[in-house]
Amino acid sequence: MGLADRQMTRKIVVANSKGGCGKTTIAVHAAAWFASQNHKVALVDYDVQHSALDWLKSRPAELQQIDGYEPGRAIEESGYDALIYDLPAGFDSNELIPLIHGADCLIIPVLPSAIDVKAVVRFLLQLQKSGVLENFDGRVGVVANRVRMQAKFYKYLTAFMERTPFPTVTTLRDTQSYVSAMAEGKTLFDLPQSRVKQDLDAWYALMHWICEKQARAA
Ligand SMILES: Nc1ncnc2c1ncn2[C@@H]1O[C@H](COP(=O)(O)OP(=O)(O)OP(=O)(O)O)[C@@H](O)[C@H]1O
Ligand SMILES: [Mg+2]
């Protein structure tokens, strides 16, 4: 899937103040996808738990290279085709202002439970209140994660998706493939196609949205 041109550096920030909603999962998958397209990729892990950097450490050497960064280590952004920022839970929305400066997209994962939906609504209100999105000329997209369509909790998510001004860019299934792939420093892109066939289209929809050239509007 040759979507991303190398004329520009893409900066993608994955954030939600709620823990465990899939920020790191999405950040490492986006990083691995760009790397699979032979792009030079930096994965910037803002979490003191270093989950993304731990994943990177366990990544098999034969897979395409991704450079890991933590805050404080200077990064020459223009030297990369893609910069992926993985933010921790509880990240102060005011601190997001310098971070999302110049970003192409802000991705907000959300899980389909009442608690998670309430938390993401609060997070969006905080962003609004602190003026984070006012000067942001990138795009904001929601990713519905760990979705089981038949689950009764799905109704909380659909109600949220219908009300939020931001598009739900993709819906990721709840599957243990993420747990097993990431334990080995891999992503779904690195697993046998037969095993992940039904999940890949959802990822391609997300990567397609990330790589869209037009519409720099919040
Ligand atoms: N679609 C999915 N299906 C199954 N498990 C998933 C899925 N997405 C994430 N997980 C699992 O859920 C857990 C939390 O995911 P992840 O670490 O990506 O969330 P996070 O938002 O980065 O968490 P934190 O706030 O602690 O940084 C992990 O064990 C991950 O493997
Ligand atoms: Mg994380």
Image (spheres, grey):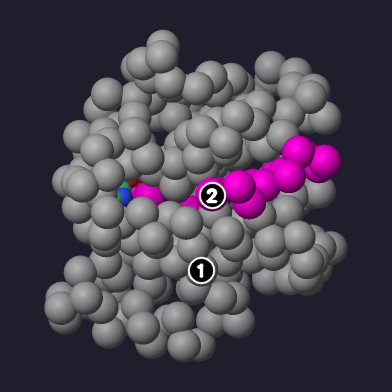
Residue beneath disc 1: 169
Q: In the figure, 94 relative to 64: above or below? A: below
Which image quarter: residue 55? top left
Q: Could you say where residue 2 lies in the image, as x and y percent from the top left? A: 60, 47
Question: What residue is at 15 percent from the left and 78 percent from the top?
Answer: 150
Total numbered circles: 2
Q: Seen in the image, is 12 located left or right of residue 123?
A: right
**What secondary structure characterizes most of the magenta part?**
loop
Query: In the image, is residue 2 part of the stretch drawn in magenta?
Result: yes
Does 214 sit left or right of 209 as displayed? right
**Residue span colored magenta:** 1-23
- Residue closer to the observer: 49 or 32: 32
Residue type highlighted by circle 2: Met
Q: Which residue is mark 2?
A: 1
Label 1 Cα neighbours within 10 Å, binned few <14 / some 14-19 / many ≥20: many
Q: Is residue 167 above or below residue 202?
A: below
Q: How far apart are labels 2 and 1 at the CA level?
A: 18 Å
Left or right of 204, for residue 146: left
